[in-house]
Image: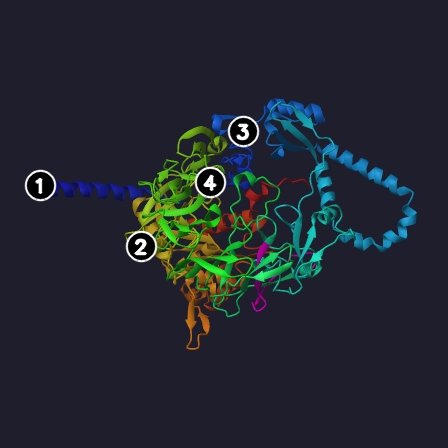
Amino acid sequence: MRKPVIFSAVLFFFLASAFVRASEIVPLTKANYELPGRFTPNKMKKMVYSTSVDAHWLKSSDRFWYIFETSEGKSFVIVDPAKRSKRPLFDNVWMATMLTKLTKDPYEAKHLPIEGLKFIKDDRVVYFKVPKNKDVLEAEKRKEEQEKKKEKKDTEEKEKVEKDADKDKEKDKEKSAAETAKEESRKFHHFEYDLTSGSLTWLENYVQEPKRPEWASISPDGNVIVFGRRFNLYTMDKANYEKVLQNPEDKTIEERQLTTDGEENYSYHGLGMFGRGETNVDKEKNKDKRKAADIIWSRDSTKFALIREDARQVKDLWVINSVADPRPTLETYKYPLPGEKESPQDEILIFDLAKRDKLKAKADLFKDQSLRIMTARTPAKMRDDDYRPSLWLSETPDRLYFSRTSRDFKRIDVCSADTATGEVKVLIEERLNTYVETRPLGFIANGRELVEWSERDGWAHFYLYDGAGGLRKQLTSGPFHSESIVGVDEKARVLYFSANGLEPGEDPYYEHLYRVNLDGTGQQLLNKGNFDHRVSLSDSCLYFVDNFSRVDTLPKAVLYDNRGTAILDLETVDVTLLLEAGFKFPETFKVKADDGITDLFGVMYKPFDFDPSRKYPIIAYVYPGPQTESVDKSFSTRGDRTWRLAQFGFIVITVGNRGGHPSRSKWYHNYGYGNLRDYGLADKKAAVEQLAARHPFIDLDKVGIFGHSGGGFMSTAALLVYPDFFKVAVSSAGNHENNVYHRWWSEIHQGVREVVDEKGNVTFEYDIEKNSEIAKNLKGRLLLASGDIDNNVHPANTIRLVNALIKANKRFDFFLFPGQRHGFGDMDEYFFWLRADYFCKHLIGDYSQDVDIVELNREVEKTK
């Protein structure tokens, strides 16, 4: 009987000690504005430089180059994996000396302003440019102006009448790409550095190639250019394209019209995202200009395909830019809302350039279906090319691969179309009772084999098919998430893929690179280590660069071979200045979801001057998913919504929720299907409660929450669904009323019901809970914010909630960002301080803020 007595005494002592410790904890009453002021975006640029190795693979070998910057300046590095060598491209001191000698402009080894670096001449020579001295540029400009005046002096009076008549016309004259390239070239000194001889050549009269106009879709062989104008397609040959580059107003330029039936909102060009982003005034002004068409080319340049979208019946939406100069502007665009019968209609058109005709693929099956043409993977060695034409998957022009998705997203077909007849063959069918998702198709031996990504067994895995659509083998299996195809070695018959959730003891979101044979054997982890990994694989699949870190570690980069053997340590990120400024790494944690079973993973950010004898308010930064959970897994200096906010005197957390990130099971990802407003809230609440039970420095009576877009929606919902728990919310650009948010997102993740009547007619039914419906529940402090020209999440989402709150006689705050879209652009830093002020006032009780945001004013140079 003595043991229970002893145990009780020990327990009493522990509880008493805990009570004393808890009673000693003092609530925070004053916010710290000095600490976050140390880490403004401008200051961060001067403390942390490169955070990863960005590998540029060369065309002629498996070598690659990269630029890595630290507080000691930039290093220009060339790596030869076969030789296991890493060396500077050149000696910086020598290069600075040579640049100074040749140009007479002063340069210094730690501050080499090298731009536009690229390998040319079979990777034997490096081209680059450096900006000219400002005084030199001004002197050259004055000299050029004097020469022009001298040339025109004799003819000035003669041409005066003609000039006055064409004065307005000259203002609107389009500058040629050649003129632009010439002007841009003059701003720089241009050089070629020979890697073999180590010699540097100054290209004194260099003029860079004219930049490709955005409207020009150039065939892979470079001989045909396709573009849009007045809703139709036109072509020109290479010779006429060269004329355009020299002078867009050249009257001898020949264009050939390819289509004649295009019309507004049923165009062959320019309706991407339903025409958003152009004001009505600009739309009228630009109506006759050449425009880009979304062209997918056959590899032999004989054919191309595109998706033509009929949005004529889709209803309009509008935003007004009140701060436009000189008058407010109106933007009208097509925007389908969930449940509406007026839906965009897709069709695939295949053009034969020799015959100059088009063929429609016979792809119709589902009502209001969407179509997507599958494109070839861009080789790593082509990433530095000035132009990369979009190519269709097949190596031959006879077949076009595409996917077809039903409006309810429960059915997706992978199809091929005969480009001569338009006949369509279904190769793979994907069917689920929630929404189906896909990834790019693995394409082997010109389509004789296909690798499909599918969640059909509840986890994302890869499946091997023959070219006719017959299933050969499931390549990966088990309770983990296969993310994407990284590369395919057809000769060795090996698939390289990224995946997560497979390594025991790790955060299941940490991504790794694996290989597996195309017969399903030999699966192997290639980059071990309890980190989140991001890789760049060479086109030969022999080597890869691995960038890895966690939120609580420094990023590193290592070169590996395709068997997982480390070849070279490349770089470790330099954060010396950041640590000297007081930065401290955050802490990771794991909690249970509200069901008490599901593991959730998060990150806790503390003030850098954290005092365990203080009691801190806790703030959750949230995004509901289903695309992501906004929980960092790797090191990041972008901490405005997390560690920088914590410096005012908060514990800031990010944590997942059921129905969030897609990189877990299909069950986890689709948990919120049909309950888009409330599904993640209980898990956020449960996470905060568990953390408060673990840590006496967390004040459970002062809980804040905030987020942007979906996070804006979620943070307000939290305040309304759990009004006695969440006390303060800041919600920006939230889709509070998903019935007036974009059809695509709302119908996928909430679900839309397809109804077929006795006659076979198909209609769609949609319903969703809205924040405005429970506005009467508001008890805490709420700040709503929106950009006034947000054409993604329309301001109506926020304004309708504002209307409901007013009708419910609630006090709240509302802030409108003039001239801003879904992101707040150059006003984002202002919003950081506005959001922080709100939490400082209503969670800490600090109302000491001045009218001026002094921390922002300190960043502005007072030049006047």
Cα gap from disc 1 to disc 4, whole angstroms: 55 Å
Figure disc tally: 4
**Badge 1 or badge 4: first in the primary sequence:** 1
Residue under circle 4? 636
Cα gap from disc 4 to disc 2, whole angstroms: 29 Å
Q: Quadrant of residue 101?
A: top right
- Please check the rendered image and state whether residue 335 is part of the magenta-colored stretch, yes or no: no
Element assignment for label 1: helix
Q: Residue furthest bottom?
A: 758
Cα gap from disc 1 to disc 3, whole angstroms: 73 Å
Residue under circle 2? 594
Q: Are marks 4 and 2 in contact (CB under 8 Å)?
A: no
The scheme the figure's colours follow is: rainbow
Q: Is residue 469 above or below residue 84?
A: below
Q: Which class describes the residues within 10 Å of circle 1: few (<14), some (14-19), or many (20+)?
A: few
Q: Are marks 3 and 4 in contact (CB under 8 Å)?
A: no
Q: Are marks 3 and 2 in contact (CB under 8 Å)?
A: no
**Residue sitting nearer the eye, 427 or 496:** 427
Kind of residue indicated by mark 1: Arg
**Residue sitting nearer the eye, 750 or 35:** 750
**276 displayed left or right of 248:** left
**Badge 4 or badge 2: first in the primary sequence:** 2
Q: Quadrant of residue 487?
A: top left
Cα gap from disc 2 to disc 1, whole angstroms: 39 Å
Residue under circle 3? 78
Tell me the number on the disc at residue 2.
Answer: 1
Labels 3, 2: front one: 3
The percent coordinates of residue 860 (x first, y second) are 61, 41
Labels 1, 3: front one: 3
Placement of the N terminus among the 4 image quadrants: top left
